[in-house]
């Protein structure tokens, strides 16, 4: 395993007498939320290391974040406010003072507010996961303004809501107990690439005799290291889950006592599962029948059995239902009885964050603005009925990461759209802005963090002064609020106050955070050993009355993709676009040492699909469908299964081969539950082009 343990980034001679060590937290959108220590000498960050005192970080950082100083000190950091000086998208900007920028932005937003506040849209995601720089003063500002609300669906809402219907929330096993499991299903997750600190526990379990099974269309780095790889077709996870249930039932590998006491809807689920014999599952999933049978036997007969479900399997039409189906499995075998059994998709629901105090939705004062789905931002910006007239983007790079880029770009290119982008770098989105405001990094501001992969709270203290004239998001929204005459005292809260507001003192001891950088939530070891699920019934809800009340199926089902593999002769290949290991969504693409590892945008294609198309390894290919086209380099690779191609990573468009990226091909269609994006539900054709 390549944990970059305690890597020294800057080879400076660190003088211990003159240097200080500052405790921080990794801000990135990753389940691991590491604790790190920055060594600062004469005001300069010279070393960044994983905190050895924090048991989840265990002194080790990933390759990306061990380069955080390189990112922080990058020569292309934005260091002053910029105002557009050429046509939209021309890339021409001129520096202006903060006063000029903020006065003008406040005046323009103020004018729109008087006309129709809902013509203003905030667009943000998890560029930082911090509760302060991610979702505090900004929310207060837009609530007071009465701006359109943003439905933040782009990552996890299908799986998150699906899990919520079955288990009651984003809750599950404690990650550390995976080390004690005897069987681990790593389902829709490339843990080595995107959840490295979980992988550590999986390896510990393996050393103690556990079997690891990876369920993923791609033969990922993680699949390489597992005992078995089940390379199902994208979007067929629900069918596989039902196949496992079928076998658990016919072989009576069930915990009848657990089912009777702690679940709801068993008879109905049983009837549905019996419609999924292994042969049918094998045909739908595109895998050998024996694999279904063997996996069911392992799951039905091994204790403790744990499932690490990740978001990779829910970015398809049926993502919500598939999550619900998988979430039924632990209850059927009573896996929850043991602390090393059960399932973990996200732990974020375990944190008692005082969101209302931090975000102040009461500032809406009874108004209920319209909600715009971030996963369909292209259509939203092109909608002429009730147009968005201003968009304020922060902690996100929608032009690169949102689906159906042609429409996203056309939307942001609108001459009549007023766009403000708060950024650390000149991203594809910043290129289309009217104002670009330089934002601080995690080494330069305060923040407090929950996690979606463990159950500790982390505090981040600033280690160095902001670069140039950069300011934190919270500062920028505070200043805009002042200029717009928002005089509620909450607009004066400083960042440390916001950090202290995030958790009640009974839940998290702030002094402990100040001293150690982290604090562990007090939680039971096997929370669902005796039911107590946070659902309305307190049971694991195979059948959800809440869903039935919405007029949809109360039971999970296998919902096929919008664009199932093999369903189109024009576009015969299914494309998934999972993360590149050395990037974090579109972050780090501009960090040279990391881009040097990834080299260039890549499409993995199986030899059986490459040969008839005359595609050789290393060839430039054109990937296309009804939404667009995109060029990159082909890698003829066993990492791709026949019929499925893997377009890795979200490259900055301008750093790709032809000024586009993989999202030129993805669609804005939404998931069955949670209104999420369907990035991995995408048919394409591929052809070799003369390079
Ligand atoms: N290095 C790195 N780490 C990251 C990220 C990154 O970009 N780079 N992204 C972060 C973010 S935003 C998130 S949300 C998290 C989790 O992010 P996820 O998107 O869950 O990332 P992965 O763990 O890579 O898991 C995706 C895996 O699911 C597989 N997959 C694709 N379609 C299907 C399917 O239909 N069924 C199944 N079973 N598998 C499928 C992919 O091949 C891939 O290996 O990771 C975070 N960590
Ligand atoms: N095709 C395809 N598309 C995908 C995915 C996929 O697997 N395939 N994954 C999807 C997923 S899971 C997600 S979560 C989204 C992620 O999409 P985004 O949330 O947009 O994530 P990033 O691309 O990392 O962009 C975050 C930006 O925030 C900036 N930033 C970081 N910290 C700060 C700060 O403190 N202040 C300000 N102002 N800016 C800051 C960074 O410089 C960076 O440019 O992408 C989605 N898009
Ligand atoms: Mo994500």
Image (cartoon, grey):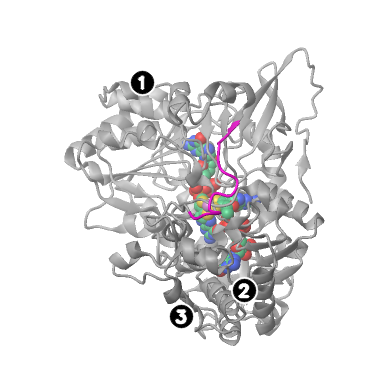
Q: CA distance from mark 1 to mark 3?
A: 58 Å
522 within the magenta span = yes
Sequence order check, earlier mark of 3 and 2: 2
Which residue lies under the disc numbered 2? 253
Residue 562 placement (x, y as % from top left): 44, 75
The span picked out in magenta is 519-531
Q: Nearer the viewer, residue 161 or 97?
A: 161
Label of residue 492 in the image: 1
Q: Are marks 3 and 2 in contact (CB under 8 Å)?
A: no
Dividing the picture into quadrants, the one containing residue 305 is: bottom right
Residue at figure coordinates x 68%, y 27% from the top left: 38
Residue that sits furthest to the top in the current view: 17
Please tell me how crowded label 2 is: few (under 14), some (14-19), or many (20+) other residues with Cα within 10 Å.
some
- Give me the C-alpha separation between circle 2 and circle 1: 59 Å
Name the residue at the left extreme: 115
Ligand 2 has an atom within 8 Å of the beta carbon of the residue at disc 1? no
Q: Earlier in the sequence, mark 2 or mark 1?
A: 2
Q: Nearer the viewer, mark 2 or mark 1?
A: 2
Which part of the image, by quadrant, shows the C terminus? bottom right
472 or 513: nearer the viewer: 513
296 vs 363, left or right, is: right
Q: Nearer the viewer, mark 1 or mark 3?
A: 3
Asked if 79 appears above or below 523 in the picture, the reply is above
Magenta includes 184?
no
Q: Position of residue 139 (x, y in %)?
A: 36, 36
Q: What residue is pinned by disc 3? A: 271
Q: Is residue 572 left or right of residue 120?
A: right
Relative placement, left or right, of 110 versus 391 is left
């Amino acid at each position: 395993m390549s944990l970059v343990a305690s890597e020294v980034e800057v080879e400076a001679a660190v003088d211990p007498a003159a240097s200080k060590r500052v405790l921080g937290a990794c801000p990135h959108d990753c389940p691991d939320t590491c604790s790190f220590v920055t060594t600062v000498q004469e005001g300069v960050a010279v070393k960044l290391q994983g905190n050895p005192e924090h048991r989840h970080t265990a002194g080790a950082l990933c390759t990306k974040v061990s380069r955080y100083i390189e990112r922080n000190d990058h020569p292309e950091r934005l260091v002053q406010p910029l105002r557009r000086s050429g046509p939209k998208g021309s890339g021409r900007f001129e520096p202006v003072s903060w006063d000029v920028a903020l006065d003008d932005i406040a005046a323009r937003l103020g004018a729109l507010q008087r006309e129709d506040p809902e013509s203003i849209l905030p667009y943000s995601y998890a560029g930082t996961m911090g509760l302060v720089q991610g979702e505090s003063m900004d929310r207060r500002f837009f609530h007071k303004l009465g701006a359109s609300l943003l439905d933040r669906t782009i990552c996890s809402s299908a799986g998150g809501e699906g899990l919520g219907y079955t288990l009651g929330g984003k809750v599950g096993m404690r990650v550390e107990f995976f080390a004690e499991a005897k069987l681990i299903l790593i389902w829709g997750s490339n843990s080595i690439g995107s959840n490295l600190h979980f992988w550590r526990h999986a390896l510990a379990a393996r050393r103690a005799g556990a079997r690891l099974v990876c369920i993923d269309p791609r033969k990922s780095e993680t699949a390489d290291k597992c005992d078995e790889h089940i390379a199902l077709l994208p979007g067929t996870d629900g069918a596989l889950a039902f196949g496992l249930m079928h076998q658990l039932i016919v072989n009576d590998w069930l915990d009848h006592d657990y089912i009777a006491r702690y679940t709801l809807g068993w008879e109905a689920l049983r009837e549905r599962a019996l419609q999924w014999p292994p042969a049918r599952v094998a045909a739908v999933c595109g895998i050998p029948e024996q694999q279904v049978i063997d996996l069911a036997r392992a799951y039905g007969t091994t204790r403790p059995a744990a499932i690490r479900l990740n978001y990779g399997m829910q970015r398809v039409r049926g993502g919500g239902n598939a999550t619900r189906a998988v979430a039924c499995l632990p209850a059927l075998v009573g896996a929850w009885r043991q602390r090393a059994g059960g399932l973990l998709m996200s732990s974020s629901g375990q944190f008692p964050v005082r969101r209302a105090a931090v975000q102040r939705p009461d500032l809406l004062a009874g108004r209920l603005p319209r909600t715009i789905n971030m996963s369909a931002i292209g259509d939203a910006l092109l909608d002429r009925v009730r147009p968005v007239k201003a968009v304020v983007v922060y902690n996100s790079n929608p032009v690169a990461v949102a689906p159906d880029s042609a429409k996203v770009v056309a939307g942001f290119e609108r001459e009549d759209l007023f766009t403000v982008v708060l950024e650390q770098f000149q991203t594809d989105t910043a290129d289309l802005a009217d104002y670009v405001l330089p934002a601080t990094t995690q080494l330069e501001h305060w923040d407090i963090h929950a996690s979606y992969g463990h159950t500790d709270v982390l505090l981040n203290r600033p280690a160095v002064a902001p670069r140039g004239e950069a300011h934190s998001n919270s500062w920028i929204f505070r200043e805009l609020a002042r200029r717009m005459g928002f005089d509620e005292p909450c607009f004066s809260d400083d960042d440390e106050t916001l950090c202290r507001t995030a958790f009640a003192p009974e839940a998290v001891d702030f002094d402990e955070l100040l001293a150690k950088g982290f604090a562990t939530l007090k939680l039971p070891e096997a929370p669902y050993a005796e039911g107590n699920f946070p659902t309305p019934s307190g049971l694991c809800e195979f059948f959800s009355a809440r869903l039935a009340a919405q007029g949809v199926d109360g039971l999970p089902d296998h919902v096929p993709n919008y664009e199932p593999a093999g369903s189109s002769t024009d576009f015969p290949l299914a494309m998934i676009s999972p993360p590149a290991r050395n990037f974090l969504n579109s972050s780090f693409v501009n960090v040279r040492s990391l881009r040097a590892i990834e080299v260039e945008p890549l499409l993995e294609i199986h030899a059986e699909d490459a040969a008839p198309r005359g595609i050789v390894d290393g060839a430039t290919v054109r990937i296309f469908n009804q939404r667009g086209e995109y060029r990159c380099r082909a890698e003829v690779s066993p990492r791709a299964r026949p019929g499925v191609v893997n377009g890795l990573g979200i490259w900055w468009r301008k750093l790709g081969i032809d000024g586009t990226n993989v999202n030129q091909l993805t669609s804005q269609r939404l998931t069955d539950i949670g209104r999420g994006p369907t990035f991995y539900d995408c048919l394409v054709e591929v052809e070799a082009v003369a390079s």
